[in-house]
């Protein structure tokens, strides 16, 4: 049995609703799932409140847009996953709201840059194609560019215009990663370093990084991920053992906004062992009985 602990829904930049994700997970026989939308708990909450979970185990999740710690040379995003968080912890919700506001301010600026580059498009069209205003971001803008024939595919939109350092790139507020991890801990959850193989500069000294992140509250590493090759998976698994961190994994499914990625299996060969889910939930409950969380 396998699990998928990294999934995006329509609450951010996925194209399936939480309930559609749940029924797909039933169909393909996943043992456990987590919806980890960018900077919002709405999709995860809907999943956990669904009466249709059946045999599927689920845990709350989020993927926070953080800024990298000082030791990381790269700019741009440093994604921190949070699992097992309480939905109603006010300080976390307040920061997520700030991140959502930052997106709302950023998207029109990206459109302005694209207009200046000669592309005729506006926010109303982005919203219409996305089917709503929830969690809008660059992937939705990329989809409109594709729809209008300005690019062949979403990757090309990022490579040529929207990616970090490209002509239509606009920076946005990100939570300092120590703060993101502290908020996840305070909300009763476990912070996990998302897709290290994608996030980290290959030159980074992983031991130095983890030596910094563990005291900040890091509790796990996303070891299993579609873009991780065998050597990376082994390297991150070994690092998790060295630092006593949990291992997690998932597909980073986004529906048709990342058409090459399938739920559960990623690009086809991803297998996230369900034993990881048991360890994660056991760690969370041990943690709850030891430390009185924000909800007692
Ligand atoms: P945003 O939240 O607006 O900063 O956009 C982040 C999203 O863009 C993430 O979900 C990524 O999956 C997606 N993304 C980032 N870089 C690329 C890329 N080069 N190609 C396709 N999608 C990307
Ligand atoms: Zn995304
Ligand atoms: Fe991510
Ligand atoms: Fe993601």
Image (cartoon, grey):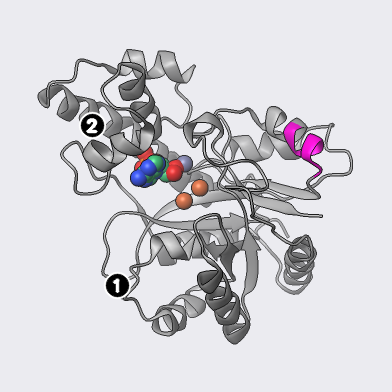
Q: Left or right: 166 with respect to 286?
A: left
Residue behind mark 1: 70
The dot on residue 110 is 2
Res 294 → quadrant: bottom right
Q: Residue at x 26, y 38 (%)?
A: 162
In magenta segment, residue 27:
yes
Q: Residue furthest right?
A: 55
Is residue 97 within the magenta segment?
no
Q: Which of the two residues, 237 or 18, is positioned nearer the viewer here?
A: 237
Q: In the figure, 236 relative to 153: above or below? A: below
Residue 219 seen by the camera: yes
Q: Relative to 143, does residue 4 appear above or below in the rendering?
A: below
- Observer able to see residue 98: no
Badge 1 crowding class, 10 Å Cα cut-off, few under 14, some 14 to 19, many 20 or more, is few
Residue 26: percent from the left, percent from the top? 81, 37
Question: Which of pointers 1 and 2 indicates the residue nearer the eye?
Answer: 2
Give the magenta part as a residue range.
24-29
Q: Position of residue 35 (x, y in %)?
A: 63, 43
Disc 2 C-beta below 8 A from ligand 1: no
Instruction: Look at the numbered disc 2 and give the secondary structure of its residue.
Output: helix
On screen, 257 above or below 180? above
Write the residue at 34% across / 76% down: 204
Q: CA distance from mark 1 to mark 2?
A: 27 Å
Q: Which quarter of the picture shows residue 121?
A: top left
Is there CB contact under 8 Å for labels 1 and 2? no
Assign ligand 1 to one image quadrant: top left
Which type of secondary structure does the marked residue at label 1 adopt?
A: loop
Residue 149 is left or right of residue 200, and the answer is: left
Residue 61: % across, % down = 62, 49
């Amino acid at each position: 049995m396998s699990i998928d602990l990294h999934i995006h829904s329509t609450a951010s930049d996925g194209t399936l609703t939480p309930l559609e994700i749940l029924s797909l997970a039933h169909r393909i026989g996943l043992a456990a799932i987590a919806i980890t939308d960018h900077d919002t708990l709405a999709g995860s909450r809907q999943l956990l409140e669904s009466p249709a979970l059946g045999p599927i185990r689920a845990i709350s999740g989020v993927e926070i847009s953080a800024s990298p710690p000082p030791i990381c040379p790269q700019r741009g995003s440093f994604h921190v996953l949070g699992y097992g968080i309480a939905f109603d912890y006010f300080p976390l919700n307040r920061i997520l709201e700030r991140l959502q506001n930052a997106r709302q301010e950023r998207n029109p600026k990206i459109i302005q840059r694209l207009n200046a580059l000669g592309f005729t498009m506006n926010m109303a069209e982005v919203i219409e194609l996305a089917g709503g205003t929830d969690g809008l971001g660059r992937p939705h803008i990329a989809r409109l560019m594709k729809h209008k024939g300005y690019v062949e595919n979403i990757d090309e939109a990022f490579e040529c215009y929207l990616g970090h350092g490209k002509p239509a790139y606009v920076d946005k507020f990100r939570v300092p990663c120590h703060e993101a991890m502290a908020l996840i801990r305070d909300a009763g959850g476990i912070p996990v370093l998302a897709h290290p193989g994608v996030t980290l500069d290959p030159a980074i000294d992983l031991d130095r990084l983890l030596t910094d992140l563990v005291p900040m509250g890091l509790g796990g590493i996303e070891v299993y991920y579609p873009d991780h090759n065998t050597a990376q998976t082994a390297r991150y698994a070994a690092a998790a053992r060295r630092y006593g961190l949990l291992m997690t994994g998932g597909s980073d499914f986004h529906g048709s906004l990342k058409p090459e990625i399938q739920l559960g299996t990623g690009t086809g060969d991803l297998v996230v062992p369900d034993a990881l889910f048991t360890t994660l939930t056991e760690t969370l409950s041990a943690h709850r009985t030891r430390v009185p969380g924000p909800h007692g």
